[in-house]
Amino acid sequence: MTVAICIGAYRLAEFVELNLCQCLRLFGEDTLVLVSDDRSPNSDAIKAIADKHGAGYVVGEKRCSHFSGDLQCFINASKFGELTGCDVIIKISQRFVPAHEQFVNVLLSPFEEPGVAMVFPGQPKKNQMARPGAMFYSGFGLLTDCVAWRPKELMAGQIESFYRDQLTDVTDQKKGKHLVEVTFGRIAAKLLDGRIRSLDALANHHIGKPKLFLRKAQSNRGEYINLAKQHGIEGDFDVREWAAIEGKDYLPIGAII
């Protein structure tokens, strides 16, 4: 099974480098990786990191926003999967870092079933959250910080069209249409019904077993720092929510891209 990886990036260059290093360590040094960057003052540094590790790099002319930037990463990932001809494309957010070698098998083994088109984390538990400000994540039935799918089953144009339709449909008054979690919940139900696998092992850490991943909502700064030391990477490794990091500059919106 051939895989390619797309890492979403915005501002936090140290997370991008740690993610790149861990992906190459666990999936193999010859794994094709693309960094999908949302424009920021740190974009030059992020591009330099991608170049240093032999990864591809793509960035928009201007910043998208929190949610549409994440959605753009999915589109770029799907295009990357189509171009590379891989069996499975993996989209990973910058602060979701694969941490243990067992992570690869957990993520990819469901694709041994030909009928499985997509794999994503299930619902995280409240008692797994690292801080009170992250509790809202437990309200999502699925998470989108680590999603794998067969590019032929869900192509870039389908993702873009679905998101556009969702934002412009004035008859749909359901809240949260701009949230990528909502978008992919609907994609899973309407486009890939019966062909998805929701994995608790990607949503929750299991007592007595090594942590397969570090997730911003479920990890503390020290865990990232300790893992980064293995690669000689230094940085702030800020695990706050974006509203706290960016203040008045935060853009919590969806947009037609």
Image (cartoon, helix red, strand yellow):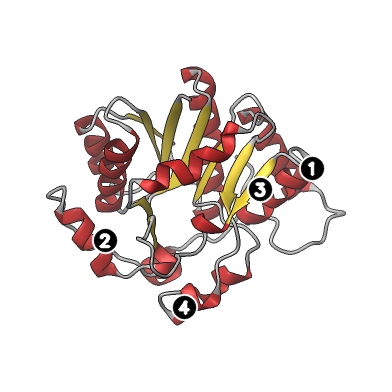
Q: Residue at x 16, y 47 (%)?
A: 231
Q: Is residue 28 visible?
A: yes
Disc 4 crowd rating (10 Å Cα; few below 14, some 14-19, many 20+) is: few
Q: Which mark is residue 190?
A: 1
Residue type at mark 1? Lys
Q: Nearer the viewer, residue 14 or 227?
A: 227
- Whole-Å distance between the Cαs marked 1 and 2? 37 Å
Q: Which callout, 4 or 3, points at the residue further toward the start of the chain? A: 4
User: Callout 1: few (<14), some (14-19), or many (20+) C-alpha neighbours within 10 Å?
Assistant: few
Note whether 242 is above or below 20 in the view shown.
below
What amino acid type is highlighted by mark number 2? Tyr
Q: Considering the numbered disc 3 on the image, is that residue within a helix, a strand or a loop?
A: helix
| N-term mark: 4 or 1 | 4
Give, as a three-letter code, the residue at label 3.
Phe
The numbered mark at residue 224 is 2
Numbered disc in front, either 2 or 3: 2
Q: Which of the two labelled residues, at mark 2 and mark 3, occupies the earlier sequence position?
A: 3
Type of amino acid at the residue the image marks with label 4: Gly
Earlier in the chain: of badge 1 and badge 2, it is 1
CB atoms at circles 2 and 4 under 8 Å apart?
A: no
Q: Residue 190 at x, y = what percent?
A: 79, 42
Viewer-nearest of discs 4 and 1 = 1
Closer to the eye: label 2 or 4: 2
Query: Could you tell me how far apart the alpha carbons at marks 2 and 3 are, in whole angstroms?
Result: 27 Å
